[in-house]
Amino acid sequence: MTKNYFYITLLLAIFFTSSAVAQDSKQTPKIQENTSIEGLNLYPNPVTTGKVYITSKNDLEKEIIIFDVLGKKVLQTMITTKELNVSNLSPGVYIIKITEENATSSRKLIIR
């Protein structure tokens, strides 16, 4: 009788150990690091003058990509100054994606 309890305990221990190992082998979801641009400012928003100013803490060269509400890329450029000319864009709502070094941020941009 004592041997039966020993074998049952041994089997349960093997079962729970193998299921714990199976759970450990699953891939854990990757946590994205915070890669937003520190001190990012986008003004004026809404844009009425055809020019938008983009500043950040580091004020480095920035890649700018602007998408319309359907996701179509309507403008892609690099800027080294704070000023971006958007006068050729039609009035509407856009998404602006700004990349500076390895950091990226997106904002809603309204052009009137």
Image (cartoon, rainbow, N blue to C red):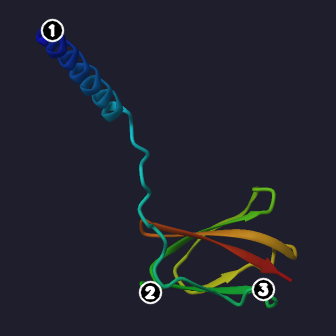
3D distance between C-alphas at marks 1 and 2: 74 Å
| The one of 57 and 61 positioned closer to us in this rendering | 57
Question: Which three-letter amino acid code belongs to the residue tagged 3?
Answer: Pro
Residue highlighted by disc 2: 57
Residue at the spot 52% in from the left edge and 74% down from the top edge: 62
| Mark 3 burial class by Cα count in 10 Å: few <14, some 14-19, many 20+ | some
Determine which quarter of the picture holds residue 52.
bottom right
Please state the horizontal and vertical placement of residue 12, each as a whole percent of the image: 25, 20
Determine which quarter of the picture holds residue 79.
bottom right
* Vertical arrangement, residue 16 with respect to residue 5, above or below: below
Report the side of 58 relative to 9 (left or right).
right
Determine which quarter of the picture holds residue 90.
bottom right
* Vertical arrangement, residue 45 with respect to residue 71, above or below: below
Residue highlighted by disc 1: 1
Please state the horizontal and vertical placement of residue 80, each as a whole percent of the image: 52, 80
Which label's residue is closer to the chain start, 2 or 3? 3
Which label's residue is closer to the chain start, 3 or 1? 1
